[in-house]
Amino acid sequence: MSQLHVEHVTLTFGGLNALSDVSLSVPEGEIVSIIGPNGAGKTSLLNCISGFYHPTRGRISYGEHDLSRAAPNVVTSYGIARAFQNLELFRGLNVVENLLLARHTHLKYSLLDSLVYYGRASRREAENRAYVERIIDFMELEEHRAHPVGTLAYGIQKRVEVARALTLAPSLLLLDEPMAGMNVEEKEDMVRFVLDIGREHGITVVLIEHDLGVVMDISDRVYVLDFGQLIASGTPAEVSADPRVIEAYTGVAGHDPRQAVGA
Ligand SMILES: Nc1ncnc2c1ncn2[C@@H]1O[C@H](COP(=O)(O)OP(=O)(O)OP(=O)(O)O)[C@@H](O)[C@H]1O
């Protein structure tokens, strides 16, 4: 069982605690959302999990692996993939090329492999292509497959970004605002994909999302950050009834308590 554990994580930038003593767990197979007002620390937390930032204090682990000091490519090798808020796609390449490139970069084999073991390399190439085709089918990208990504509608590009992360065959998928900027129909499609990824394919999903209706509909568990601190957690029903959450979202709360001691 690979559970994600974040234990007492603090992340400091200069005098600001972007995260203060945050602890949370993500059980295998669940869809878990992280919510909170702008600047609450959500993306910073995802950056710590995916190895782009390293916690100033605390520990992050996934199953037996310690992620606290791991580089992004090492985190990926443990089965954790991330779809970015700002799309990480090559806009001039088409959908198939983007997905193949992502899979190649992840499952790289050496030049020697491809020269000496031509048979093995070409078999891997065929497997990669077959895998990418399954993702294209699953994410319903068939009609867009040959188009340069930069020419596609924004909602479709977001879908390609999720597909790109799926080509890494993750057991844990990190989604940073996958529905931001989408119209209602595009959101409904993305909700369906996230539910399929989690419920049908058993991939654990950690989701940052501002649309609270979506969050409450699809999450098994919700964690709420405010000013870098974890202020609430529980089922969607528990969290939406929590006075601290209502306060954080209505802005009744007073000052920013994040200034690090001694700053
Ligand atoms: N690289 C950085 N350098 C300095 N400060 C940073 C850095 N990254 C994040 N911060 C600060 O940390 C705090 C938390 O930011 P973060 O982006 O994690 O919040 P968020 O909850 O994801 O916000 P949003 O919903 O607006 O995306 C903010 O005050 C932000 O300015």
Image (cartoon, rainbow, N blue to C red):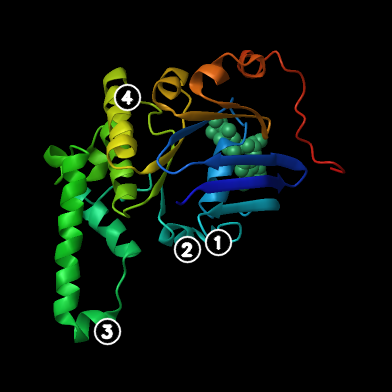
Chain-order first, disc 4 or disc 3: 3
Q: In the rendered structure, are the residues bearing label 4 and label 3 in contact, judged by CB atoms less than 8 Å apart?
A: no
Examine the rendered structure and indicate whether residue 132 appears above or below residue 184: below
Name the spot of residue 50 as percent of width and height, x first: 50, 51
Upstream in the sequence, badge 2 or badge 4?
2
> Which structural element holds mark 1?
loop
Viewer-side residue, 233 vs 77: 233
Q: Position of residue 79 (x, y in %)?
A: 40, 56
100 lies above or below 39? below
Q: Which residue is mark 4?
A: 187
Q: Of the numbered discs in the image, which one, if any, rests on residue 74?
A: 2
Q: Which residue occupies the extreme right position in the image? A: 262
**Left or right of 33 in this view: 170:** left
Three-letter amino acid code at the position of disc 1 = Ala
For ligand 1, tell me if the residue under mark 1 lies within 8 Å: no
- Label 2, label 4: how far apart the Cα atoms are: 31 Å
State the separation of the CA atoms marked 1 and 3.
28 Å
Numbered circle sitting on residue 70: 1
Q: Residues within 10 Å of mark 4 (few under 14, many from 20)?
A: some
- The 10 Å Cα crowd at callout 3, few under 14, some 14 to 19, many 20 or more, is few
